[in-house]
């Protein structure tokens, strides 16, 4: 009899566990920052997936038919907006499931012109013309994107509103602390000029008043003579002593920059899942890296 009771209890627990798993909000995102925001806000009540491979730029990635089908089956699909992940305009996704997390500041999008076509990773040739899309590098905008995630989750699962709101408040605090730390650093020498290896820092530059000029280089590719000449022309007028990179550049590039009196500093946008740590850890490291350029 005791054995039967034990089996009944175990079966009951398994059924409860299975029901709880099935009841989790299924969330798909188009980049890693949104995955991080969703996981922080949703906690145990959500199952968040960001299926882009680690070796691609999610902004220019095109998922296969099976992955698109998984997006279509999700409860929520978190979009970055600002023209990010252009594939979403080429496929059929349920409108009621779409959440444009940057919709509250669409009027503040930055328009850019970039006719340079280049490639990084297996995603094919592309340019950055159109709208600047790394919106979360302005941490006040990141907080507003996180707020939209929280609102969508509360609407989808109102019974967990208190949890979602509490988790969002903690995340907002962390993001605003990043904002305060970065503003403190960059305000020390507002006249300082910087270079950037890639045109992905527009919102960072606007929010934190960085005097920034960009080229279009890749950290794992040695610039050709034309690219070095372009940098020399820019630096003859802009005179930057530090260049921001999405990842550490190869030694050959660092040597060439050093000969021009230019040092390299990594500020990782964190579009894809980091090799270690999480979004908050990456951004804290970015800020400390940038601090070195302000000494």
Image (cartoon, rainbow, N blue to C red):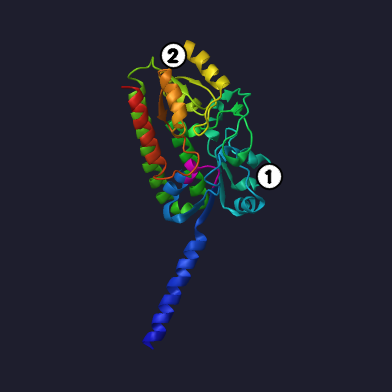
Q: Are marks 1 and 2 in contact (CB under 8 Å)?
A: no
Q: Name the residue nearer the viewer: 28 or 243.
A: 243
* Quarter-of-image position of residue 95: top right
Give the magenta part as a residue range. 29-35
Q: Position of residue 159 (x, y in %)?
A: 46, 55
Mark 2 highlights which residue? Answer: 239
Crowding at mark 1 (Cα within 10 Å: few <14, some 14-19, many 20+): few
Q: Position of residue 157 (x, y in %)?
A: 50, 53
SS of the residue under disc 2 = loop
Query: Which residue is at a point 39% across and 16% down the rendered structure image?
Result: 192
The reply to whether residue 172 is visible in this rendering is no
Q: Is residue 70 left or right of residue 147?
A: right
Q: Label 1: state its secondary structure.
A: loop
Which part of the image, by quadrant, shows the C terminus? Answer: top left
Quadrant for the N terminus, please: bottom left
On the image, numbered disc 1 is attached to which residue? Answer: 91
């Amino acid at each position: 009899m005791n054995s039967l009771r034990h089996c009944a209890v175990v079966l009951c627990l398994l059924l409860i566990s299975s029901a709880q798993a099935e009841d989790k909000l299924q969330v798909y995102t188009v980049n890693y920052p949104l995955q991080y925001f969703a996981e922080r806000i949703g906690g145990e009540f959500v199952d968040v997936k960001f299926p882009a491979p680690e070796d691609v730029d999610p902004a220019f990635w095109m998922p296969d038919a099976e992955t698109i089908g998984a997006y279509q089956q999700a409860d929520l699909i978190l979009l970055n907006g600002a023209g990010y992940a252009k594939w979403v305009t080429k496929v059929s996704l349920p409108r009621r499931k779409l959440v444009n997390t940057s919709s509250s500041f669409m009027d503040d999008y930055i328009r850019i012109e970039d006719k340079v076509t280049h490639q990084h990773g297996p995603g094919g040739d592309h340019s950055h013309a159109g709208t600047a899309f790394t919106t979360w590098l302005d941490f006040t905008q990141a907080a507003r994107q996180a707020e939209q995630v929280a609102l969508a989750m509360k609407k989808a699962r109102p019974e967990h509103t208190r949890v979602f709101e509490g988790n969002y408040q903690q995340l907002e605090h962390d993001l605003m602390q990043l904002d305060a730390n970065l503003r403190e650093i960059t305000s020390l020498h507002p006249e300082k000029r910087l270079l950037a290896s890639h045109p992905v820092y527009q919102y960072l530059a606007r929010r934190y008043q960085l005097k920034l000029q960009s080229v279009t280089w890749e950290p794992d590719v040695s610039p050709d003579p034309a690219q070095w000449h372009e940098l020399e022309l820019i630096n003859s007028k802009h005179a930057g002593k530090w260049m921001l990179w999405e990842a550490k550049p190869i030694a050959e590039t660092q040597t060439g920059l050093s000969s021009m009196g230019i040092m390299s500093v990594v500020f990782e946008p964190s579009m894809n899942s980091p090799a270690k740590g999480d979004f908050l850890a990456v951004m804290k490291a970015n800020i400390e890296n940038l601090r070195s350029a302000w000494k």
